[in-house]
Image (cartoon, grey):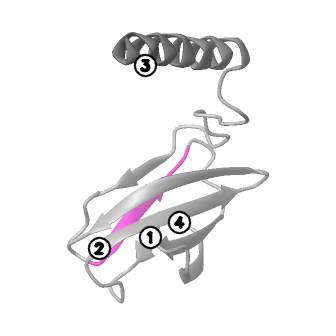
Amino acid sequence: MKNYFFILFLIFGLGFGATTYAQNGPSKISTSDGISNLTIYPNPVSNGKIYITTKDNLTKEVEIYDVLGKKILSSSVFGKELNISKLTAGIYILKIREGNNSATRKLVVR
């Protein structure tokens, strides 16, 4: 008998949570970027340089964070090339600002 109550609780509890999520959707999470045609390559990188291209090709402010959220590097990119040879192998987060737009990407360094 206890198992039936537990199963009913799970069904109604999970069903209610899914219904609430479907009605309200995710809170303030956007999957689209403000930067048109943002491309970062190569990723993963092993040669110490990455290339960042966009549609507008304006000056980009790039910040690189480690997985703990500590800022590792901050740089302005006037062309496409960014030297990251001082980074050790690992996973990093890139925050890129171009004009009034910004985007965040994952970067893998081997």
User: Which quadrant of the figure has residue 97?
Assistant: bottom right
SS assignment at label 1:
loop
* Main SS, magenta residues: strand
SS assignment at label 2:
strand
Q: Is residue 92 magenta?
A: no
To which residue does mark 2 refer?
Answer: 90
Q: Position of residue 46 (x, y in %)?
A: 20, 72
Q: Callout 4, which amino acid?
A: Gly
Considering only vertical position in the picture, is 73 above or below 7? below
To which residue does mark 1 refer?
Answer: 67
* Callout 4 touching callout 3 (CB < 8 Å): no
Q: CA distance from mark 1 to mark 3?
A: 39 Å
The mark that comes first in sequence, 1 or 3, is 3
Q: Tell us which disc is closer to us: 2 or 3.
A: 3
Q: Label 3 neighbourhood size at 10 Å, few (<14), some (14-19), many (20+)?
A: few
Q: CA distance from mark 4 to mark 3?
A: 60 Å
Q: Residue at x 55, y 53 (%)?
A: 104
Q: Tell us which disc is closer to us: 2 or 1.
A: 1
SS assignment at label 3:
helix
The mark that comes first in sequence, 2 or 3, is 3
Q: Label 4 neighbourhood size at 10 Å, few (<14), some (14-19), many (20+)?
A: few
